[in-house]
Every structure is written in C-alpha cells, then in structure tokens.
Image (spheres, rainbow, N blue to C red):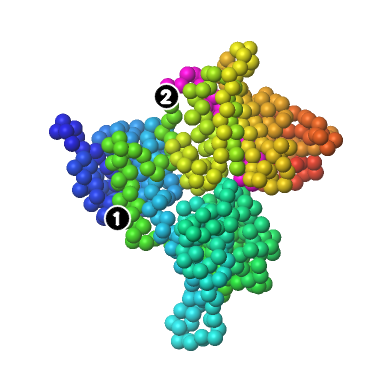
Amino acid sequence: MPANLQPFTLLAADKLAAEGLDYINAQTDGTLLERSDLADLKKDKGQEAVDAELGKLLAAGGVDAMIVRSGIKVTPAVLENPGDLKIIARAGVGVDNIDLKAATDKGILVVNTAEASTITTAEHAFTLMMALLRNVGPAHKTMTEGGWDRNKYKGRQLHGMTLGVVGLGRIGRTVAERALAFGMDVVGYDPFVSCDLQLGEHTVRTFRDFKEMLPHVDVMSFHVPKTPETTSMLNDETFSMCRKGVFVVNAARGGIVDEEAVVKACDDGRCGGAALDVFTEEPPPADSPLRTNPKILVTPHLGASTLEAQTAVSVDAAKACLSYLRGEGISGAVNAGGVRVDLTALQAAYVDLAARMAKLISPMVTRGIETLEIELAGADLAAASGTIERKVLVGLLQRHFDTPLNVINVGPIAEERGLEVRVTRLEHAPSSPTQLTLTIHGPDGAVDGQTPAADRSRRIVGRVYGDLQPRVVEINGYPMDMVPVGPMVVIQNDDKPGMIGMVGQSFGGGGVNIADMAISRRSNADGTATALMLLKLDVPAPAALLETVGGQDGVLKIAGVELPPSAG
C-alpha cells in the first residue's frame, strides 16, 4: 500500500466470528473498528438508540465498509449521512435488516454471503430427512425416559426412495447431490429451470409444474423462497395428489408448507411424517400441534447455525468488502449500485420503462420462462440494450427469489436456469415511434402449460414520448395508454355489462381509491369478447380484496403489483 494512502476502515457493527475479525486485522490495507456493543445497546434501549449511535459514527467519516449480521438493522436513518461508506456486507443470506433503497440511493453497494451457508443449510435439511425416516427424535425421547421400544420405531431407508427437490437453486442442488450419493432417485421442481438437471453422471428429471411432480416422490424437501406462488404450495389439496405416506422436509421458509394441512395429513395417513425447521410464526405458539404431533420433527430454525457457517460468513463478508474497496471485483451483490451513467435522457427513460414493464407483466407469468424476446425499435436504444435486458430480467424474476436480484447478478442466474434471451434491434423510419416490446414464452412453447405460445404468449409494449414519462401502450393484445407508476392492479375479465361497476364498488368498499383506470376490449378467435382493466391506486390493494374480486363471476385473472413512483 502506498505510504500516502490510509488503510480502509471496516466497521464490524455486529457480533462476528473471531476469524472474520482476525482476517481484517491481518490485512495491511484493512483497519478494524469493532462495535459489537451495538447489539447490547439495541437490547437495552431499542433500535432508535442504535440508529442514532451508528448514524453518528458514519457521519463522522472514515468508515469505508460496514459488516452486519441479523442483529443490527441498517435503516434510512442510519444512512441519512453515510460519510465515506461505500459497501455494506451482510454476514449471512438475507438482507431484510438492510434498507436496500436507502443504500442504493446513497450509492452504497450491498452484498451478502449466501454461498457460505449453502452446505450447512443443505446438510441440516438432509439431517432432518434422515432423522425423520429413522424416528431418531421420538426414539431418543423414549430412551431418556427409561424406555426401549425397538419395534415401535422401525424406520425406512433412503436407498431406493425417490426424493423430490422443490427448488433447484444452490441449496436444492446440494441436497440432490447428497441424496444421489445415498442411492436415492432424485427428481425436482423448478419453473425457472427449462431442462433436466445434470449432476455428475446423474440426470435429475425436472418438472415445471409442482402438481405433476407429486405422484412420483416418496420424500419432498423444500428449497424455494416464500412468494405468493410458493406460499402454502403444499396444502390439503396437493397432499391428496401425493403418494400415500409421503415424507416432508421444510428447511426453507415458514408458510411454504401449510401447517394445518401437514398436521391433518399426518393424522389421516396421507403424510408419513414431517420435519420442519421453519415456521409461519417463529417461535410457534407453545400449544401448537406442530410441537406435539408424534409424526412431526421440529427444530428451532437451525439451518445456518453451525460454527463453520458462522465463521465462513464472517470471513467472506470481510473479503467481499476489501475486494470491492480495492477495485478487484464484486461478489454477492444484492443491489445494483446504479446502472450506466453515460446514457442519454431518452435511453435512461427507456431503462426505467423496461423495469416497470417487466414488473407489471411478471405476475401474469406463472409457469416459468423459457424464452424472453426483447425488441428495441429505434437506433437510439442500441447503447442501452444491455442495461435494458438486465433490468427486464430483474423485473420478471425478482418475485421468485428471496435474494434481491440486480443488473450484476441476474445474468448468470438466468443463464444457470436455461432462460434464453433474444434481443432484436430494429432500425426504422424516423417517423415511426421508438418503442420497447417484451414477449415471454413458457416451457415447451406454452405460457401456462396448456395453450400454445402463439396464442397466449405474454406481451407488453411501451413507449417514451417527449415528456420522458414511461407509458404502456399494449398488454397481451389489448391497446391502452397508461403511465405505470405506484400501486397497480391488472384485471382480465369477460366483456359484459356490470364489470366496471363491480370493480369500482369492490375497491371502494375495501377502502381503496382508484386514481386512474385504463380499459381495453378485444374479440377473440373463439368468438368470445374479453377486456383488460389496468387500475392505478392510491394505496396497494390488500390480498384479501384481490382474492374477493378475483372470485367474482366474469373475472378471469387478477394481479396486483407495486411499481416505483414517477421518476420525473
């Protein structure tokens, strides 16, 4: 390090493993500022006291990087004046305790260390599966009480069973590899993996429809984020589609497995047993049947709780900070930290439009994406095509991931899942409007698993005019003109009298004001007529209201989405 340069200062604002602290101290260009007392301050005086102390520390300047775990929240108040802070590292997976918008607005990169706990989390899921099938929990309890019930706790062997891995990301694939080593057959479900998964010499058959996988498995292990699509995906209905006596493991997120349904299925024999590390409410109530049902094994969210994982996340967080500060690269990024700064005002407006269009159409894409077509009409957009492509991918895929996606990490994630992106640049006459078109095709040439893409491919078209405001001018063949900002709802319905009145009355009765409404109608090839309503709301629509309206006669589809406010 040149003598005229000061070393980087890394603030450990949470209680980190000693190895992470030692790593920082061992670097010639790294100076450690340890404030593990902030965790105790939070316990004694609350979050506001931490905000004040941490905010004051940053505002004084000299702190280049900050590392936190789950105990300290990085709020907008903390980042109001971040001083010299350039990067925040979360020693762990989630970043719920870091305000990403506040960090991005201040130009601060946020990273996490998700890969460091992959093996630990996967091992715990596999441990739960083995303990469940061999009745380790109740057998141990009987032994400690003086019993010896060998016949009562006769178990099952994994070898020869079929494991269904729900979610084929890092953790799911790690579980699959271990199951194959134990002689299990493995299949998987992941709507965003468009081909069978190859793990060494083994091919994992991949289903894009969860219900299609269910009759094929003896054991299910869940490794998906909690989203509207995955919440209660294993419920009373889907349990009935499973093999009788199926075993269930959930070490992902509470609520993915319907807790009432799993108790009922254990009691009536549809479920051979369940092992749960995560719960809808943590901890679950003391009188919860999950704690007492003899066929359910529970642990208190231990997925990432090993000495090795806690050491790894601390060291990896320190390495990520110094690598970024040194200009060596970015690892584990969970926010973009900004996009290209050399774009014209029009190009930047189309980048913003692309993100809004993708997020708006995303709830309509429920069965995965095989091909994404991006059509850029107008030579002005050529320079922005790469940024537009990544913004579109983030908007389409984010709702399916726990980890925040950004323009840095979304490309490899899409490629890993076999998603094909086709970008077409059209140069046209000056009199023709510059516009952006997104078309999404699902697996096997179908968006919903049933209808050919030629008939039902998801398509959205947008333009930016002289005022640089984003506008959506078409959705799935319905022409319209709407500025996509703020809370919105898309409704497809039969084109018949009374639908507009029903929608207005329902939203008004639910206390949600409709600020603007665009309505478009079309005649379909089968002789029917349908309409599309695009509602702009003052506040986001509650899920219960969307469910109520969606259940009304004539409503074909409904989806809510919350877009950023106007950029202008």
Dominant SS type (magenta): helix
Q: Categorize mark 1 by other alpha carbons within 10 Å: few (<14), some (14-19), many (20+).
A: some
Relative height, residue 401 to residue 144 (above, below): above
Q: Residue at x 49, y 19 (%)?
A: 345
- Hey, which quadrant is residue 519 in on the image? top right
Residue interval drawn in magenta = 341-368
Report whether 450 appears left or right of 59: right
- Hey, which quadrant is residue 19 in on the image? bottom left
Q: Residue at x 63, y 34 (%)?
A: 439
Mark 1 to mark 2 CA distance (whole Å): 38 Å
* Residue 122 visible in the shown view: yes
Q: In what element is the residue under mark 1?
A: loop
Q: Which residue does the numbered mark 2 point to in the structure image? A: 341
Q: Amino acid at mark 2?
A: Val
Q: Residue at x 46, y 79 (%)?
A: 140
N-term-proximal mark, 1 vs 2: 1
